[in-house]
Image (spheres, rainbow, N blue to C red):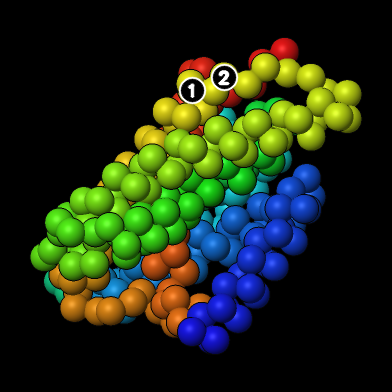
Amino acid sequence: MGIRLISSAVASALAIGVLLLHNTVVFPIAIAAVSMILMFELFRAAGCLRYRLSAGIAFLYGGVLPFLVYFGKSAYRPLAAAIACILLFATYILQHTRMSLFHAIMLVFGTLLIPYSMCCCITMNGMDGIHGIIYVVMALCGAWLADSGAYFVGTFCGRHKLCPKISPKKTVEGFLGGVLTNGILFIAFAAVYSRIMAARGDVFTVHYVTVCLLGMACALIGTVGDLTASLIKRHFQIKDYGNIMPGHGGLLDRFDSVLLVVPFFCAVLQLTPLYSY
């Protein structure tokens, strides 16, 4: 437990430092680093790292994409993704005698999903000069707080297993508790944030219904991401994706729900506001 707490404290300190520097080049550097670590852990679990040329193309794309978004070159994202896919399939053709279709698909899957999802943090940060970083914090909390809420509710009230063959510890009660907790925490966060900003002379309206529903949706989507990652681990017969975070496992073990929640959160923000003046 001590190692787990120390690991969490170090990770939290690093995350806070990056968020405080969200308007500097440190932000895309951190997003690129996280993206490549997540890709590395997934590819290692799937046995894709043996295909060095393909993995190198994937890592290059994951490292470059955050800087395209950060420096306002998002229009090039589809082109970059298309080129990455073409090159990956080209390497599959070159290595078809020793690369299976499964590995080719896993490489394309990880290359397209992970960098895109993580770059949504940069997109949200740039949406609004005032609220941008708050959107990022809310999206990340939407993924992680639901898991904590589900854990505590499930520990004390859990009776019925949610998906016993995939994640034996998850319960229906914990899942529902996580969804409800997320909605309540999102409302509380928005209320406190609006009052802090009002005290600084920045008054705006909070759309509490949207905030609450978004928080609950993040909990639901985060569970899908978590269970999917658990199912993949069971398929590869591994306990964790890595050991970069002692007591927690790999970075992908902590970001599995984030990979679905963040792009969903970003898409919702482009359709409806959480705060308005």
Q: Is residue 71 left or right of residue 103?
A: right
Q: Residue furthest front?
A: 156
Q: Secondary structure at mark 2?
A: loop
Q: Amino acid at mark 2?
A: His
Q: Residue furthest top?
A: 277
Q: Give the CA distance from mark 2 to mark 1.
A: 6 Å
State the residue in front, 200 or 20. Answer: 200
When asked about the image quadrant of residue 126, the answer is top right
Does residue 138 appear in this view? yes
- Mark 2 touches mark 1? (CB < 8 Å): yes
Label placed on residue 207: 2
Q: Amino acid at mark 1?
A: Thr
Q: Residues within 10 Å of mark 2 (few under 14, many from 20)?
A: some
State the residue in front, 179 or 39. Answer: 179
- The residue singled out by tag 1 in the image is 210
Q: Position of residue 203 (x, y in %)?
A: 79, 19
Q: Residue at x 58, y 64 (%)?
A: 33
- Eyeballing the image, is 189 above or below 208? below
- Eyeballing the image, is 247 above or below 198? below
Q: Residues within 10 Å of mark 1 (few under 14, many from 20)?
A: some
- Eyeballing the image, is 175 above or below 56? above
When asked about the image quadrant of residue 264, the answer is top left
